[in-house]
Amino acid sequence: MPSLLDSLKADLIRALQLLGLIRSRMNQDKIYNTALSLIGYDASPRNEAPDMYACAETVSSIVRKALPELRFPVITGTSELFDYLDRSPSFTRVISPEHGDIIISPTGTGNGVLPHGHTGIIGNNTSPDGSLWIMSNDSRTGTLEVNFTLDSWHRFYGTRGGYPVFIFRVD
Amino acid sequence: MKHGAKRSILDPRDYSFHRSFGITYASLGLKEYNYDAGFGMPDQTADGYPYGCTGYAQAEVAQDIDKDHYAPSYTYQKTCAYEGHDTTTGCDIRTSARVGQVYGMQRPEETTESQAQTHRRGAFYNIEQIPGLDWFDSFRTQLRKGSSISIGTIWFPEWAYTQSDGIIPTFTYNGNANVYPWHNYKICGEKTINGFPYLIAKSWQGRHFGDQGWCYFPRETFNKAFDIYGTIGLIQGRYTPTDIVTVKITMLQFVLHYLGRIIGLQAYA
């Protein structure tokens, strides 16, 4: 049973949302919470892509599960996923990451050192290196794991692989 | 309850916007916009045209593009004449679009057909679902290219109870589209309510309906409504000389088309 303080807090948040003073993060929360609940599991059981390369399928499966009303397709490649997110009116490219955002470095855009790009879901908690955690498919196990931070992603894919790093936020 | 449009049977002769021009994506840099030209909030029943929604949709979409005021009654009456009936029944949405091409739109102060001819409409294009996107995002993609869209859907009984916030409520559908009234109205923008995107619609029911005459479609309701066979979304710009095209059909195509009409494969010509 929520306390009076919780109830007042919820009313205040709703009032601020109605006034447009703060943004609703309900859909971001849904993506984050779905990803969180799937840590340690194969989030793409349909296995349309081999587990080794299933990061895009994992992310699209999480979005499909979290927001079925979006009718998000199953996408098996980071390049296709980037194209989709870039053109979908439901996703906006942002600069400052928040929990529930999708981080993506699409295959084919790097310097060739790393053959494949990657994609994952940004977490809510701060890692020891001071940046947010990232949940993504672990190609060794085929399961969703907390295996990157924003800093380590930028170091690995951005600096080493020469990939651009894009962040997309759902409406 | 609104009615006045006929269910739009799939017509293979329709031009598809996406197939004609390719799927392009435009970013307005805005999350909220409304293309309505601002010539008031009409009420088709109060105006004496309870079945005239096609005329209103046609005139309003043309207004938004031309930023000029057009009389819905002119388009509706011409459409009725084109279909061969009086104004006690509704019209086909495609016929209404064709009337815009043939007769043009009439300003309220204009009296002659030749004046209306100067506001003729061009070819009309069907808005289809873009592969991978839902109906809601397919229409948003199209809207962001810069013009309102005339749409035809069932007008569900539940929608008559739209509250003053303008949000169209969800509905139950019994699977038989023929027993429901169909309505032609326009989608003309996007609005964010409580952080969620909505499509702005104007449905010619006066200021007492919804939010001062505006209503807002949430994603799920819009997708559910457009999944029903017979819905249509049309976009139609101004007439340009390039709209005149010569279509050549072979004798075999002509015969097949004629036979198709006889056996009822194509309900509307």
Image: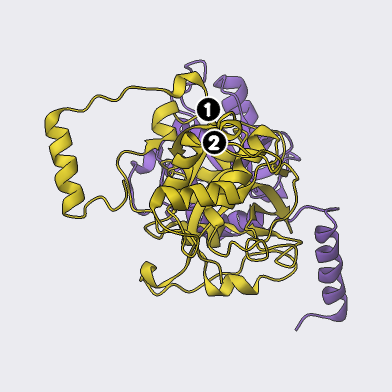
Chain colours: A purple, B yellow
B182 or B111: which is nearer to us? Answer: B111
Q: Residue B61, image x and y in percent?
A: 60, 42
Chain to which mark 2 belongs: B
Which disc number belongs to residue B41?
A: none
- Circle 2 Cα neighbour tier, 10 Å, few/some/many (<14 / 14–19 / ≥20): many
Q: Which residue is mark 2?
A: B104
Q: Is residue B245 above or below residue A145?
A: above
Residue A132 appears in the rendering? yes
Say which amino acid is labelled 1: Tyr
Q: Quadrant of residue B60?
A: top right
Report which quarter residue B123 is drawn in.
top left
| Nearest to N terminus: mark 1 or mark 2 | 2
Q: Residue at x 71, y 52 (%)?
A: B192
Q: Which residue is mark 1?
A: B239
Q: CA distance from mark 1 to mark 2?
A: 9 Å
Residue farthest to the bottom, as pictured: A1
Quadrant the N terminus of chain B occupies = bottom right
* Identity of the residue drawn at 40% across and 75% down: B174
Mark 1 or 2, closer to the camera? 2
Total labels drawn: 2
Residue drawn at point x = 84 percent, y = 70 percent: A11
Q: Which residue lies most toward the front here?
A: B112
Name the amino acid, label 2.
Gly
Coordinates of residue A79 in the picture (x, y in percent): 46, 30
Residue B257's place in the image compared with B52, above or below, is: above
SS for callout 2: loop
Residue placed most toward the observer, B232 or B60: B60
Residue B126, position as x, y percentages in the image = 43, 41
Q: Is residue B211 above or below residue A74?
A: below
Q: Quadrant of residue B69?
A: top right
